[in-house]
Image (cartoon, grey):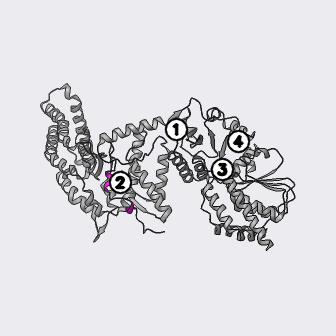
Amino acid sequence: MTNEVKMSNYYDGIYEVFNPPLVYEGNYIFLIRSLYECSKKKNGKNLVEEYFYNNYIKEIISLIKEYENLIGDLFLISDLNVDGEGRSLKVSLGIITQRICLSMVDDIPELGSDYSTYKEKVGDFFKNYKKAITCLQRKELNNELKDYITRIENLYSRNEEFRKEKYGNKYVPMDFFLYLEKLRSKIVEFLVVYKRLVNVCNKEVNLKELEDLLDLDQFYFTMAKLIIENNKVVEKTEGKLHYSFSYVDVYIEKLKYLMETYSYDIVADVVLLDGKIVKLSAKDLIREYNVMKNRHPEYRTVVLDEEAGVNYQDIRVFNVLLTQIETAMKDKELSVSWKLFKKGEREDESSVLSKVSSERKEKTDDEKNEELRRRIDFFESSSYLYRVEGINNFEGYIGYIYDNGYVIFEKFYKSKEGYELALGNATYIMNFANFIEMSKLSKLDIIKYIKAGNTDIIRRYHTSNWAKKIEAIINGIGYDVDTTKVIENLIKNGELNNRRSLNQ
Amino acid sequence: MNDIINYIDAEKDILEQLIKIDNEKMFDTMTYDEFFENCMVVLSKSKNIESEKNILFVTEGNPILTLNILNNVVNVDKEVVIFLNQGYQGLNKWLYDRYINITGNIKHSIDLGSNYNKYIGKGYKVVPLGEKAFRDEVLRDFYE
């Protein structure tokens, strides 16, 4: 195993991690502490920690001293710039603000991405609470502020419960009006320092400076893991993957290449969103990637050629390209109103085969996930004209139509539950003339058809050279008549030479 | 069958050309030296195969496997067919041709056809060789 080759040789710095060649919408967060684990060390000092402390944390803490314990770990946020051009990496002011507001009034303001609007939004947010405090102090009724008044009253009650528990026998109830005054002071003090807090957090992280402080291989690996973690959240809330996943796609491709070509390996401690630290290896990361991507057959990675004069950092360009790509992909997608190779009778696992075949070595989950990933990537990256889905979509067979007249059917998933690899299903190769009628039949009928002597359907089994065989079919590489003649002539010449040698 | 090594040695040029053709068609990267070495290994051992039935070997065309089979069926009286799934046609044709030259045993043959349907239900002892996925599918075809 050698690590002479570095992943960092395959990247142009960390800029493209947070500012990819093609900008995209949406944000993701991660703990600043995650980057400490990727830091270079000098004289025992963690250089990244030092950088963030000197440039951000020291000042943030000085502004919100009272809330230091509440704030906990600080987050960084990668987000689209407010002007819609490029992306930036900043300290997450949103999370700081939400935590402080929660602690004060058990409520959070709606903030958005534009830090320059935060002061006004937070000001407006607390305006109603200040008005509610005034009403309570004056014992006035105000229906418009009813919710705010109730919330403050509840806060007081909870605060008293907390103090009762804390002080026990020494508990003395706090006067409600004193509580209201203290709350108002807190709000006012916070609003006074908030503008400075905005300025500190609005300062973009200097990626060039940060880059010099990082162990880059650890960093690229860590970011891939963190983006996977973020996508687990997006998966739960939106049922899909986020555009940021494209970084993981590219990273994993490079990682696999380095592992296969140079026996590259890496192990890293990664601090997750909840602060837990996990140790994981390259294989662990690839496994997680396979599992996540296999859950999303709808997710496609598209590589574009860069055109001169186009500003790929403009979100409007991204949106136009996205529409164009989606249209182009839709044009390649065909669907039929039947299940492709519906299930036939007696088509189950408990066949004669289990009696004839002795041992049945089960693939591990990792092997199945890797195999599933390989099969999907193989077809999706091939030069197909159209992709055909039946009414059972990705749960059944998918057909790929090629310009040489072949239509290749593959079943990827066993079923949509669990997103497991479909084992024991051969690849079927048909042609333009027969695939529509044949694909309406069950697999059993197809096998009977083949056994009856018909040769217009080819089967290929998933052995280790499956990909080579399918590639040969797609590219029309085979033993044609001319090649067969050449072979025969060679064999004949060899024989003639042998006879000549014997006669000499 | 050890005589075949002399043929492999004497026909190096021919074999290199056949290997080149097969490599291109099968997306392989075999070299003559690898082929020669593997053949030596295979020919250093042999099994005595007996069968009351005609035998159908089904492979994916691996030529070393073909040589292994031919080496082991030299003394088999029954008909032996090696179905090669159209794989490695150059080397397999060469191996079979030289096998016939050496043994004269024309009861044994190779089949470079596109499927083995004609052997189903014909009483052959079916012996699929190769990876598990392949063997399982072949047996499923013959016995279901």
Residue A262 in the figure: left or right of residue A415: left
Q: Which residue is mark 1?
A: A386
Circle nearer the N terminus (2, 1): 2
Residue A303 in the figure: left or right of residue A382: left
Q: Amino acid at mark 4?
A: Thr
| For residue A84, above or below residue A148 | below
Q: CA distance from mark 3 to mark 1?
A: 26 Å
Label 3 or label 1, whichever lies nearer to me, is 3
Residue A102 in the figure: left or right of residue B123: left
Q: Amino acid at mark 2?
A: Gly
Q: Which residue is mark 4?
A: A455
Circle nearer the N terminus (4, 3): 4
Q: Residues within 10 Å of mark 3 (few under 14, many from 20)?
A: few
Q: Are marks 3 and 2 on the same chain?
A: yes
Q: Circles 2 and 1: CB distance less than 8 Å?
A: no
Q: Are marks 3 and 1 on the same chain?
A: yes
Percent coordinates x, y for residue A483 in the rendering: 66, 54
Label 3 or label 2, whichever lies nearer to me, is 3
Circle nearer the N terminus (4, 1): 1
Q: Secondary structure at mark 2?
A: loop
Residue toward you, A377 or A349: A377
Find the magenta span and give its range. Answer: A5-23
Q: Residues within 10 Å of mark 1 (few under 14, many from 20)?
A: some
Label 4 or label 3, whichever lies nearer to me, is 3
Q: Which residue is mark 3?
A: A480
Q: Circles 4 and 1: CB distance less than 8 Å?
A: no
Q: Which residue is mark 2?
A: A275
Q: Secondary structure at mark 3?
A: loop
Quarter occupied by residue B29: bottom right
Q: CA distance from mark 4 to mark 3?
A: 16 Å
Residue toward you, A363 or A125: A363
